[in-house]
Amino acid sequence: MPKFCQSEISYFVSDNVPISALTISNDKKVELLISIMNELRADHISWIDRSYKAAMWSIGLLVTAMSYVLMEKNNIPENGLIFIVIGMTLFGIVAQLFFCAARNAHHGIGAAIVRCEAGLRLCEAGSYLNDQPFFGYSGEWIPPTQITILQILHFVVLLLSVLIVASVKFW
């Protein structure tokens, strides 16, 4: 574990916490970092799971609204169509913002795991993991391709459904 000089410790520690409270054994530090890595891994999996659920629910609602408009196009007034298009657009924007938040969380979690690996010196030559990452991620965090694909898929469905609903009166 890296050693901090006294000025660096006093920078991170408030005046109310005595310096002696920071003396933790190396075994406890390792246990703490590994438990943090386990929690971060669980958070990473939950963000991906939430992204899949959000994408599927949002796509389902957009397709449902589009199919309703296509089935009832003669019975829906123009004001109703405008309201549905605006609602679909706003709902799609909120879903896209969620995907952006999920990508940011993915990046933050990855950076934290890489820092924990560096703190445990798991990536250094001669470490007991032989330069292998602890959780399958090391050095550089993998890009959130799953979330990006879901975001692109959602955007395509959003764009097509809004265009179809907006042009239903012209058919």
Image (cartoon, rainbow, N blue to C red):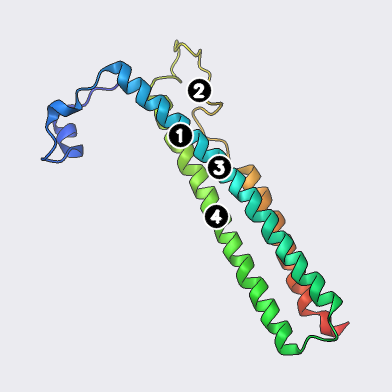
Select label 1 or label 4 by which is in front. 1
Quarter that holds the N terminus: top left
**CB of mark 1 within 8 Å of CB of mark 4?**
no
CA neighbours of label 2 inside 10 A, class few (<14), some (14 to 19), many (20+): some
Q: Which residue is mark 3?
A: 46
Relative to the observer, which residue lies in front, 28 or 13?
A: 28
Image spot of residue 157 (x, y percent): 74, 62
| Disc 1 residue crowd, few under 14, some 14–19, many 20+, Cα 10 Å | some
In the rendered image, residue 92, in percent from the top left (x then y), is placed at: 64, 66
Labels 2, 3: front one: 3
Earlier in the chain: of badge 1 and badge 2, it is 1
Q: Residue 59 sits in which quadrant?
A: bottom right
Residue count near mark 3 (Cα–Cα under 10 Å), binned few <14, some 14–19, many ≥20: few
Q: Amino acid at mark 2?
A: Phe
Q: Callout 3, which amino acid?
A: Ser
Q: What kind of element bears circle 3?
A: helix
As measured in the structure, the alpha-carbon distance from the residue carrying label 2 to the one carrying label 4 is: 27 Å
N-terminal of the two: label 3 or label 1? 1
| Cα distance in 3D space between marks 3 and 1 | 11 Å
Q: Residue at x 50, y 43 (%)?
A: 107
Q: Which residue is mark 2?
A: 134
- What SS does tag 2 mark? loop
The Cα–Cα distance between marks 1 and 2, rounded to whole angstroms, is 13 Å
User: Which quadrant of the view contains residue 30?
Assistant: top left
Residue drawn at x 83%, y 84% as measured from the top left: 169
The residue wearing badge 1 is 39
Which residue does the numbered mark 4 point to in the structure image?
A: 100
In the depicted structure, whether residue 5 falls above or below residue 40: above
Q: Of 9 and 88, which appears nearest the observer?
A: 88
Apparent side of residue 98 relative to residue 125 in the rendered image (left or right)? right
Where disc 4 sits, the SS reads helix
